[in-house]
Amino acid sequence: MRKFTDVTDIGSLRQAVDEAFEIKRDRFAHTDLGKNHTLLMIFFNSSLRTRLSTQKAAMNLGMNVIVLDVNQGAWKLETERGVIMDGDKAEHLLEAIPVMGSYCDIIGVRAFAGLKDRDEDYGERVISQFIRHSGRPVFSMEAATRHPLQSFADLITIEEFNTVERPKVVLTWAPHPKALPQAVPNSFAEWMNAADYDFVITHPHGYELAPEFVGNATVEYDQRRAFEGAHFIYAKNWSAYNAPDYGKVLNTDRSWMVDEEKMRLTDNAFFMHCLPVRRNMIVSDAVIESERSLVIPQAANREISAQVVLKRMLESL
Ligand code: CP
């Protein structure tokens, strides 16, 4: 595997999940694979889970790991070509990328959407430049439009806990005080559609996701109706995708919070969220602390999804 930025890069989902379960049974079975190989993790944005789980996955494979926080200690990087660099950005990505590539064997990149210019965000300029100019296999640790390591971990978690033939999985928008990217819901939708679950997306009017991510999902504007008979509830906030409101918070309607009363409409569903989560905005204390909450096993599976991806990249070197 030379690139991991979307669901198509992983190939067969069945095989990927089986490989994940195999790694979960013995995560130290391939400790020699990464010997004398270096992972460089580059963060343009903050992280807790991605940083720790990916680093742990690399260590399980015997890799060396270097972590760079671009905004803390590195030169400020210009990403636009053609810009006269007379401002505060001392280095261009076009030099920085091949330099970074010369110190490592595999690169992970986190670079969120700016939420100002939809074409720029959906063009995925930062991670695309790493793929083009680093000369190394590159994987996304959350890019502007997708978070595939998270979605893969979500799929592993659903496959672990599911008890029915074709589960009803509901992605629900929930309120948040700040504008958040669409990367997690886009990616989750992409992976759920590929998994061919009974997949429903529910959100207030105005929060429609890009059609290429919605795919064949059912869109239901009535959250309570969407929850009926669900086996998995996946809560997430996102800002508006459609112009002219791209990147804006249109409302923070607290009636969309996931609470016990709504969970009672489901078929005893599990609750999921990628974390970090704002309690009593997105989800009530009672739901996230309930025995049906999967947020901790879901986060733990980030180590497993990262390890599958790193293992496949190491095998391709
Ligand atoms: N879910 C997730 O990617 O968490 P972090 O932003 O903490 O890495």
Image (cartoon, rainbow, N blue to C red):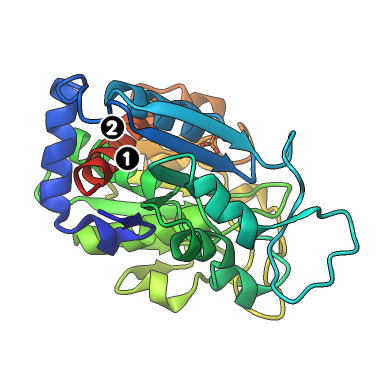
Tag 1 and tag 2, C-beta contact below 8 Å:
yes
Where in the figure is residue 91, as x and y percent of width and height? 74, 54
Where in the figure is residue 208, as x and y percent of width and height? 53, 71
Mark 1: few, some, or many residues within 10 Å (few <14, many ≥20)? many
Q: Is residue 298 left or right of residue 279?
A: left
Residue ID at (41%, 23%): 290
Mark 2: few, some, or many residues within 10 Å (few <14, many ≥20)? many
Residue ID at (66%, 80%): 243
SS at mark 1 in the image: helix
Q: Is residue 154 above or below residue 296?
A: below
Please identify the residue farthest to the right as the structure is shown.
86
SS at mark 2 in the image: helix
Q: Nearer the viewer, residue 51 or 197?
A: 51
Upstream in the sequence, badge 1 or badge 2? 1
Where in the figure is residue 124, as x and y percent of width and height? 54, 67
Q: Is residue 33 left or right of residue 76?
A: left
Name the residue carrying label 2: 304
Q: Is residue 127 above or below residue 309?
A: below
Counting the numbered discs, the total is 2
Residue ID at (39%, 52%): 136
Circle 2: residue type = Ile
Q: Which label lies toward us, 1 or 2? A: 2
Q: Nearer the viewer, residue 184 or 208?
A: 184
- Residue 292: quadrant of the picture: top left
Report whether residue 226 is seen.
no
Mark identifier at residue 153: 1
Q: CA distance from mark 1 to mark 2?
A: 7 Å
Residue ID at (30%, 56%): 2
- Residue 217: quadrant of the picture: bottom left
